[in-house]
Amino acid sequence: MNTINEKLQPILNTVLHRNAGEAEFHQAAREVLESLGPVIAKKPEYFDEALIERICEPERQIIFRVPWIDDNNQVQINRGFRVQFNSALGPYKGGIRFHPTVNIGIIKFLGFEQVFKNALTGLPIGGGKGGSDFDPKGKSDHEIMRFCQSFMTELHRHIGEYVDVPAGDIGVGAREVGYMFGMYKRLNNRFEAGVLTGKSLVYGGSRARKEATGFGTAYFVRSMLDVKGVDVAGKRCVVSGSGNVAIYAMEKIMSFGGKVVACSDSGGYVVDENGIDLDLVKQIKEVRRGRISEYVELRGDGCHYITGGSIWDVPCEIALPCATQNELNGRDAKTLVENGVIAVAEGANMPCTPEAVDLFESAKVLFAPGKAANAGGVATSALEMQQNASRDSWSFAKTEGRLEEIMANIHTACHETAEEYGAPGNYVVGANIAGFVRVADAMRALGVI
Ligand code: GLU
């Protein structure tokens, strides 16, 4: 377990006390604070207790009731959240998650991560996150629409292209963003394209936004391997999840010549030794909105499905957790290391437990934390804002080219920062310090606000 600098311990204590019971937020804050020891040792001017404490305290937290009527004419009540964490670098920016596990602690952890992630992109975006404990699974299209409209009926007064720009996350894709944008437009009587990102291409979305998070994760893996003189081509790869991030991480890894042999959803995982058939996964998940268990029936021989279990039991050289927080624990990390994994990159937000990260570090496995490896999604959201602001629409190639460049810059920043602060090869330390320094510099310039 990493230790925390004694000067930072009181700040962590305040976070734990002030946010009692919010385990995921504690985990995220502890990880960042643990990384800051070398900054304080090397550049004491960054030890501004009040500033670090402010970084750990959201600027604003909004919690609201979301009533809606289901298809049986029953009134349902959910809870909505938006945590506006830090706007030193730009308007709050971050996705909206619809999942039954959502609570204030989860949204706060995601918002906190988002602050540093967004800083790493080098683009002018602050950090925030929102969501609801609404479960989209099994809901009809009309129910989804009514929920989104009710959610926006409250949220609209807190957001805006210069204020706070939400997007998608788990359970929220182009369909939900569309329903929310429609309601925002109606309530405000203005076509404010830049108020939400992840929009459909037909009314102001950006090309390559859908693919961006997964593509970006694959680019980051390629950069980490490049440093070691290793090629993605021919490597066995396991990707958890089968949503937007997983699908496009698989696609890019395959285009680099990697062989993806397994993916999953919350019900179980599928192993296909011939290589995952991505068109089939897209058909099941993007078109039918079905379960990954259907893959085996549709694909035929050479593959199998395991209900429950751990996808990390499948031997691989590259592991990309792209499902959800804390999905890969110490046991899984041990198995992966024993099976010869060489690189792990977090496509999801904080999918590896602290114990798993420690194991990867001590086994010298290349490990990319989510705030660096999955930053391509939000970076491309910022490119969508740019296109909306200039009333322009870029080609796929131009947008992907910018994404590739941004991911390369993030990799360089993490790598060089880790070296500068005496932790060569440690991308967790590199990402946390590089993100922190950017946010701290902007906050100091703005005075105590
Ligand atoms: N939800 C994504 C993330 O975790 C994207 C956020 C955005 O595009 O604003 O970074």
Image: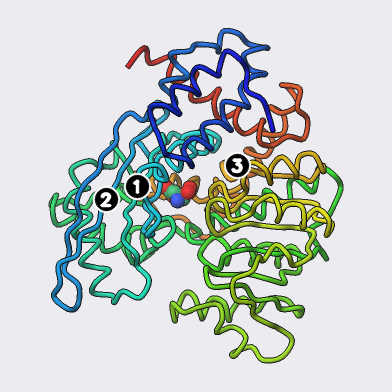
With respect to residue 107, does 55 lie above or below? above
Q: Nearer the viewer, residue 67 or 384?
A: 67
- In depth, the one of 107 and 330 nearer the eye is 330
- Quadrant housing residue 87: top left
The answer to whether the residue labelled 3 contacts the one labelled 1, judged by CB atoms less than 8 Å apart, is: no
* The N terminus - image quarter: top right
Q: Which mark is residue 130?
A: 1
The amino acid sitting under disc 2 is: Gly
Q: Is residue 437 above or below residue 27?
A: above
Residue at 33 percent of width and 56 percent of height: 133
Mark 3: secondary structure: helix
- Taking 253 as reference, is 375 left or right? left
Callout 2: helix, strand or loop? strand
Q: Position of residue 113 (x, y in %)?
A: 49, 38
Residue assigned mark 2:
80
Q: Residues within 10 Å of mark 2 (few under 14, many from 20)?
A: many
Q: Which residue is mark 3?
A: 372
The local secondary structure at tag 1 comes to strand
Judged from this view, the residue extending furthest toward the top is: 45
Residue appearing at x 64%, y 67% in the figure: 251
